[in-house]
Image (cartoon, helix red, strand yellow):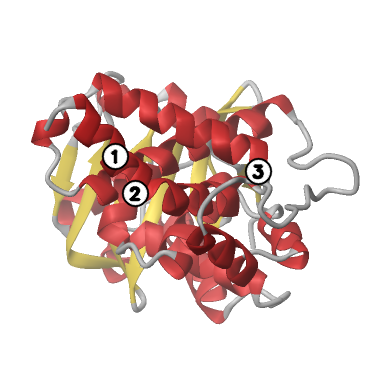
Amino acid sequence: MDAHDLANRFEDNRSHLLAVAYRMLGSETEAEDAVQETWLRLNRSDGESIENLRGWLTTVTARVCLDHLRSRKTRHEQQLEGSGIETVPTGAIGVDPEAEALLADSVGLAMLVVLDTLTPAERVAFVLHDTFGLQFDEIAPIVGRTPVATRQLASRARRRVRGAGAPAPDTHRKRAVVNAFLAASRHGDFDALLALLAPDVILSADESVAAMGVEPSIIGARGVAARFGGGARALLPALLDGDVGLVWMVGGAPKVAFTFELTGEKIVRIDMIAAADRLDNLDVALLRAR
């Protein structure tokens, strides 16, 4: 594929990419910048090795938008100017009718206001899945979560978009299980921990946690229970990107975050996260222990 063919194929996907970026960023100008950045990255890549160009371009555009959303959050900038919305005049983007139809059909002022209340990861997961039909295993690497956790991100976003104000029953259940896990860990109650853990539960530590001397992976309820028995006195319950988990705070900042995946009432996976880039982009809200 020569440079001319690559450029033509990119142009064939431009309207789709603008629709994706606009839905995530809520700004015509920023959407165009994100798509331009995608084109630059495509130019620097080996186009011949890309089997699914539309999927590759969508993924790259989503990553660019996610970085931008996180940058806004870090700088405490308002996402949209003035009243909070940048309106899009018909034909202003200069794209084909498909793009204008997508924008008109899927993006309204009220929707952008709601999307603005989501965390960056929630917004990306929701937009890519609910609007553009990507599967959770495709979205997971973009937001740095497992497919199950990515599904939860989209689910929380969907409830907010639909105007659900009260916590969902699943959230109550998960908080009860995580609180029970924390209590059993603090008291070294091995049997209580076993009762909360699935037989094949996985405890996974990222490289930064492993560098602290923690085993990178433990599989099985007895091994995980032994790891936590009596060793969780410094952990605190928290919402991590809106999801129930635990956190170890040092000097008022998160040092290690613990995320949980449940099936029914059983914990099937615990991830320990200490990588600075992930912690910096994690929304942490401490919860009062019940």
Real-space Cα distance between discs 1 and 3? Answer: 22 Å
Can residue 60 be seen at all in this image of the molecule?
yes
Q: Are marks 2 and 1 in contact (CB under 8 Å)?
A: yes
Q: Position of residue 95 (x, y in %)?
A: 53, 49
In the displayed structure, would residue 17 be above or below residue 266? above
Q: Position of residue 78 (x, y in %)?
A: 79, 37
Q: Position of residue 163 (x, y in %)?
A: 71, 76
Residue matched to label 2: 12
Q: Are marks 1 and 3 in contact (CB under 8 Å)?
A: no
User: What kind of element bears circle 1?
Assistant: helix
The amino acid type found where label 1 is placed reads Asn
Single out the mark in the foreground, 1 or 3. Answer: 1
The amino acid type found where label 3 is placed reads Glu
Q: Residue at x 73, y 52 (%)?
A: 88
Q: Residue at x 34, y 49 (%)?
A: 12
Residue matched to label 1: 8
Q: Residue at x 37, y 42 (%)?
A: 11
Q: Nearer the viewer, residue 126 or 133?
A: 133
Residue matched to label 3: 28
The numbered dot on residue 123 is none
